[in-house]
Image (tube, helix red, strand yellow):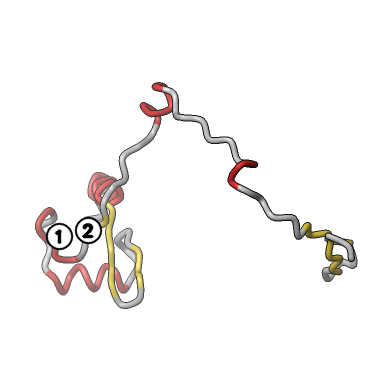
Amino acid sequence: MSDRIDFRDESARDVRISTDMVTPDDIAVTPATESEKQMTLPIEPWWTVDELLEHVPLSVSWVYKLVESHRIPHVRRGRRIYFRRSEIDAWLEAGRG
């Protein structure tokens, strides 16, 4: 039995997938250097609507109107709405707020 599986995609090119397993011994992990550690950026937290209202002088209804009309930078996760501080700061500096 072969250790490779052949598939055909839409463009009729051969695609070969190896069924060989990768073991932990196959992976070399090297610790980060000091310069690499300094290059990592902090992860910016997401603000909820309530947290946004603590920093921006807007009403709740106005924030929802801005979100609905896509006039404020935001991300939806299901029914929840989130904002990044850096995007809100840039939005305010551009005079859109």
> At x 35% / y 64%, what residue is drawn?
75
Q: Which residue is mark 2?
A: 47
Identify which residue is drawn at 31% across, 77% down: 79
Q: For the residue carrying disc 2, how many other residues have a C-alpha within 10 Å: few (<14), some (14-19), or many (20+)?
A: some
Query: Looking at the picture, how far across and down is residue 38, in whole percent?
Result: 36, 26
Q: Nearer the viewer, residue 7 or 93?
A: 7
61 left or right, relative to 19: left
Q: Label 2 is placed on what type of residue?
A: Trp
Instruction: Name the residue at the bottom extreme.
Output: 79
Kindly indicate the quadrant of the structure image that contains residue 4.
Answer: bottom right
- When asked about the image quadrant of residue 35, the answer is top left
Q: Is residue 92 above or below residue 52?
A: above
Q: Secondary structure at mark 1?
A: helix
Q: Name the amino acid, label 1.
A: Glu
Check the image and report above or below for 88 versus 79.
above
Q: Is residue 41 left or right of residue 45?
A: right
Q: Nearer the viewer, residue 35 or 56?
A: 35
Image height of 13 relative to 91, above or below: below
Dot 1 alpha-carbon crowd within 10 angstroms: few under 14, some 14 to 19, many 20 or more: few
Name the foreground residue: 72 vs 11: 11
* Residue 12 shown left or right of residue 82 in the figure: right
Percent x, y of residue 2: 88, 62
Depth check: give the residue in front, 60 or 41. Answer: 41
Residue contact between numbered discs 2 and 1, judged by CB atoms under 8 Å: yes
C-alpha distance separating marks 2 and 1: 5 Å
* Residue annotated with mark 1: 51
**Which residue is located at x 27 percent, y 58 percent?**
83
Q: Which mark is residue 26?
A: none
Q: Secondary structure at mark 2?
A: strand
- Could you say where residue 1 lies in the image, as x and y percent from the top left? 89, 66
